[in-house]
């Protein structure tokens, strides 16, 4: 989760760290959150559809244990075209990028072996199936899907939910 825990508006994004569209949407979501700093939080749920994404998810979860989730996420997204080559992801480069963002790689690699790491991904993937999510990013705002997959529809739905919040 990114943003205030008590925010009345929750954007839930089913997200794949290797997805180009997720990379493109991230700055848009960030702008929406910056316009509503006390009103909106982002909950990232994993939909590891691309090869190597399961390892990237574990890397992100390990970064959370070091309080570095956002810096590592942003570093991986910034350099995604370098490491997330479809059919041939370069996960060693992804680890290097995470390390440059401050991640203690040795500790993080050990943390990825924890049983809970696979559990997070399995839980999210079960929800992907249950909700019929078949592409990333897929958004819900307070449980409602935007009218269309374009950024304006997401921004409009968030603005409507913010206006309706107590």
Image (cartoon, rainbow, N blue to C red):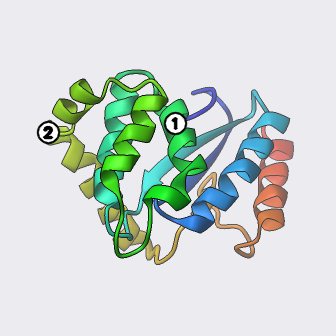
Q: Secondary structure at mark 1?
A: loop
The residues bearing labels 1 and 2 have C-alpha atoms spaced at a distance of 22 Å
Residue 166 visible? The answer is no
* Numbered marks: total: 2
Residue to which mark 1 is pinned: 1
Q: Which mark is residue 91?
A: none
Q: Residue at x 33, y 41 (%)?
A: 59
Residue 101 in picture, x, y percent from top left:
49, 29
Query: From what the image shows, is residue 78 above or below residue 3?
Result: below
Q: Secondary structure at mark 2?
A: loop
Q: Does the rendering let one see residue 77?
A: yes
Q: Residue at point 63% right, 51% down?
A: 142
Q: Quadrant of the C terminus?
A: top right
Among numbered discs 1 and 2, the one appearing first in the sequence: 1
Residue 29 lies, with reference to residue 53, above or below; the image says above
Please name whichever residue, 26 or 165, is drawn nearer the observer in this view of the structure: 26
Which residue is at a point 28% across and 47% down the rendered structure image?
Answer: 120
The structure residue drawn at horizontal position 75% and vertical position 33%, both measured from the top left corner, is 39
Q: Position of residue 36 (x, y in %)?
A: 81, 35
Which percent across, then down, holds residue 45? 45, 52
Tags 1 and 2 touching, CB below 8 Å: no
Q: As drawn, is 144 to the left or to the right of 129?
A: right
Q: Nearer the viewer, residue 119 or 140?
A: 119
Disc number lying in front (1 or 2): 2
Apparent side of residue 62 relative to residue 109 in the rendered image (left or right): right
- Residue 25, percent from left and from top: 68, 58
* Mark 2: few/some/many CA within 10 Å (<14, 14-19, 20+): few
In front: 162, or 92?
92
> What's the mark number on residue 113?
2
């Amino acid at each position: 989760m990114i943003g205030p825990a008590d925010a009345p508006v929750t954007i839930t994004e089913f997200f794949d760290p290797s997805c180009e569209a997720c990379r493109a949407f991230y700055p848009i979501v960030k702008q929406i959150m910056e316009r509503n700093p006390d009103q909106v939080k982002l909950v990232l749920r994993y939909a590891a559809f691309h090869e190597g994404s399961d390892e990237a998810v574990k890397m992100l979860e390990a970064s959370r244990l070091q309080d570095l989730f956002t810096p590592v996420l942003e570093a991986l997204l910034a350099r995604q075209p370098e490491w997330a080559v479809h059919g041939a992801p370069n996960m060693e480069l992804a680890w290097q990028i995470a390390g440059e963002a401050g991640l203690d790689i040795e500790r993080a690699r050990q943390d990825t072996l924890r049983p809970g790491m696979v559990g997070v991904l399995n839980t999210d993937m079960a929800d992907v199936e249950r909700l019929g999510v078949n592409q990333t990013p897929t958004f819900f705002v307070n449980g409602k899907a935007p009218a269309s997959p374009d950024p304006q529809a997401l921004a409009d739905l968030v603005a409507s939910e913010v206006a309706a919040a107590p």
